[in-house]
Image (spheres, helix red, strand yellow):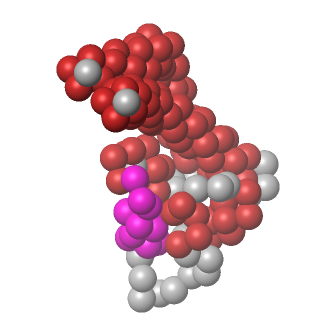
């Protein structure tokens, strides 16, 4: 009886492992979607509302649900560089593996005239959209694979226990 219970636990553990890998793929997709939405918000704030970088940061804090948003600067300080403050806020996120697009966005903000910023952010947004499409394809390809492999390895370990 104890062996059957432990075999069942191995199968369950394998399934949970597969589900956790699948959830990581979903989280990657959601991160890309939020990043693209953030860039769209920046474009809107710069082009149509004519906001400066600190006002854009305040809008991001209000609208975007990302970890780094709460650490963004809200007002000008002559002793601190905006781009360094942005970089520090982005690097304060829990998941540091996907910060490249946000760091590049911070380098773009406030560096040129309105149209220059908008076109640079738009180009970066198209890269993020491509990345989003790629991550969706990977999810469709690997989602069931991870779950099935997890359960299969759990089943194999369970059979070895029996």
Q: Residue at x 31, y 30 (%)?
A: 3
- List x then y, in percent, for residue 94: 42, 59
- List x then y, in percent, for residue 159: 27, 17
> From where the camera sits, is residue 150 visible?
no
Examine the rendered structure and indicate whether residue 145 appears above or below residue 113: above
* Residue nearest the observer in this picture, 49 or 129: 129
Is 159 covered by the magenta stretch?
A: no
Residue 1 lies in quadrant: top left
Q: Residue at x 51, y 26 (%)?
A: 132
* Residue nearest the observer in this picture, 142 or 90: 142
Secondary structure character of the magenta stretch overall: helix
Is 83 covered by the magenta stretch?
A: yes
The quadrant of the image that shows the C terminus is top left
Give the residues in magenta: 82-95
Examine the rendered structure and indicate whether residue 30 appears above or below residue 150: below
Examine the rendered structure and indicate whether residue 73 appears above or below residue 117: below
Q: Residue at x 45, y 67 (%)?
A: 89
> From where the camera sits, is residue 7 visible?
yes
- List x then y, in percent, for residue 8: 41, 28
- List x then y, in percent, for residue 146: 39, 20
Q: Residue at x 47, y 14 (%)?
A: 144
């Amino acid at each position: 009886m104890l062996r059957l219970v432990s075999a069942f636990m191995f199968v369950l553990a394998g399934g949970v492992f597969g589900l956790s890998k699948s959830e990581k793929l979903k989280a990657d997709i959601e991160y890309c979607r939020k990043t693209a939405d953030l860039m769209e918000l920046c474009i809107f704030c710069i082009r149509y509302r004519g906001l400066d970088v600190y006002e854009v940061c305040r809008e991001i804090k209000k609208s975007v649900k990302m970890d780094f948003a709460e650490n963004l600067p809200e007002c000008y300080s002559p002793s601190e560089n905006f781009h360094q403050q942005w970089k520090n806020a982005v690097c304060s996120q829990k998941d540091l593996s996907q910060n490249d697009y946000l760091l590049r966005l911070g380098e773009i903000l406030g560096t040129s005239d309105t149209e220059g910023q908008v076109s640079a952010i738009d180009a970066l947004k198209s890269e993020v959209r491509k990345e989003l499409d790629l991550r969706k394809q990977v999810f469709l390809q690997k989602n069931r694979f991870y779950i099935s492999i997890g359960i299969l390895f759990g089943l194999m370990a369970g059979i070895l226990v029996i």
